Image: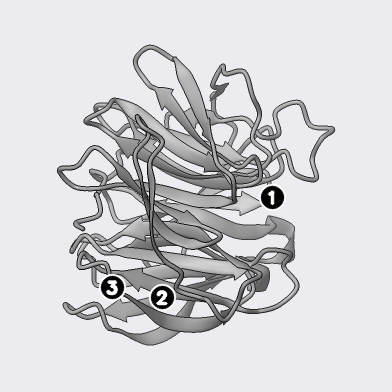
Amino acid sequence: METVPVEIVDRPERDQLGEGPVWVPERGRLFWVDIEAPAIRWLDVASGRSGSHGFPEPVGWIIPRANRSDFVVGLKSGFAFFDLETGRLERLGDPEPEHPDNRLNDAKVDLAGRIWAGSKHCADAAETGALHRLDPDLTWRCHDRGYGVANGPTFSLDGRTLYHTDSAARTVFAFDVDADGALSGKRSFLCFPEAWGYPDGMTTDAEGCLWIAHWGGGRISRFDPYGTLLRSIALPATNITSCTFAGPDLDRLYLTSAALDCGHEPAAGALFVLDPGTRGLPPRAFAG
């Protein structure tokens, strides 16, 4: 496992369950969520200023809308539009009304501007998690079920492969994606051995490799498109939750973490940043 310089971003709070970092270049800000606070966090990358907006219910992710000033958020109660400036919340609907103890958990946007979002049981007490797709016309569809903790969707460079994780099963799956968004060919892409912890959030770099956060493993790892481990970088917290490339040149890797169950660790729940030696892909916004 490599040791590289890792910076802890200076801000007033630690995240109980930091997740879902997303770079919004038009604002020069990195956004992410603290699911347990619950709150949306943000960092102005140039100035170092940071801020937070509280929520009345768990918020699993935040994604910008294309050519709009507001966002889409994934809540315990379902999908919603959210305006950070006014605090206005417009609820769109719940994709899982049959599972009132579930919440949305982790999401990404594909090349067509669709959101792919997982879900999980709030108390991890049942395998009721699923994989949903929210389309630009604001309709949604469930594509897969039976997840313990649905996590970390990301895509191949051409967008024709979707990677999606069941953290509880320590497994990252791969699916073929048709032009219309249909999935097929579900298969195991890689399985984490117990010593690695659990695969959590992930992102794809400009070379088509996957960077995967290790919950319980204190590291971030890079895998090639065939699932071969290329690098593993040690981090000063056990529960690393997700990652994204940010900055004007997309050459900085930001990582969220969780203080949950790690109160003894000084850096648990911090936002980390490092130089990964590669660049990320331009971020995508929801087309709806």
Q: What residue type is labelled 3?
A: Thr
Q: Is residue 227 visible?
A: no
Q: Can residue 193 be seen in this view?
A: yes
- Residue at 51% across, 54% down: 201
Q: Position of residue 278 (x, y in %)?
A: 33, 38
Vertical relation: 208 (above or below) 8: below
Which label belongs to residue 139? 3
Residue farthest toward the right in the current orientation of the protein: 264
Q: Residues within 10 Å of mark 3 (few under 14, many from 20)?
A: few
Which label belongs to residue 217? 1
Quarter of the rendering containing residue 80: bottom left
Q: Is mark 1 on a helix, strand or loop?
A: loop
Among numbered discs 2 and 3, the one appearing first in the sequence: 3
The CA span between labels 1 and 2 is: 22 Å
Q: Which amino acid does label 1 sit on?
A: Gly
Vertical relation: 116 (above or below) 181: above
Q: Which of 285 and 65 is in front in this view?
A: 65
- Residue at 26% across, 64% down: 114
The CA span between labels 2 and 3 is: 24 Å
Q: Where is residue 8 in the image (x, y as percent from the top left)?
A: 58, 22
Q: Which of 132 and 69 is in front in this view?
A: 69
Q: Position of residue 208 (x, y in %)?
A: 30, 56
Q: Is mark 2 on a helix, strand or loop?
A: strand
Mark 1 vs 3: CB contact within 8 A: no
The N terminus lies in quadrant: top right
**How many numbered marks appear?**
3
Mark 2 vs 3: CB contact within 8 A: no
Among numbered discs 1 and 3, the one appearing first in the sequence: 3
Q: How crowded is mark 2: few (under 14 residues within 10 Å), some or many (20 or more)?
A: many
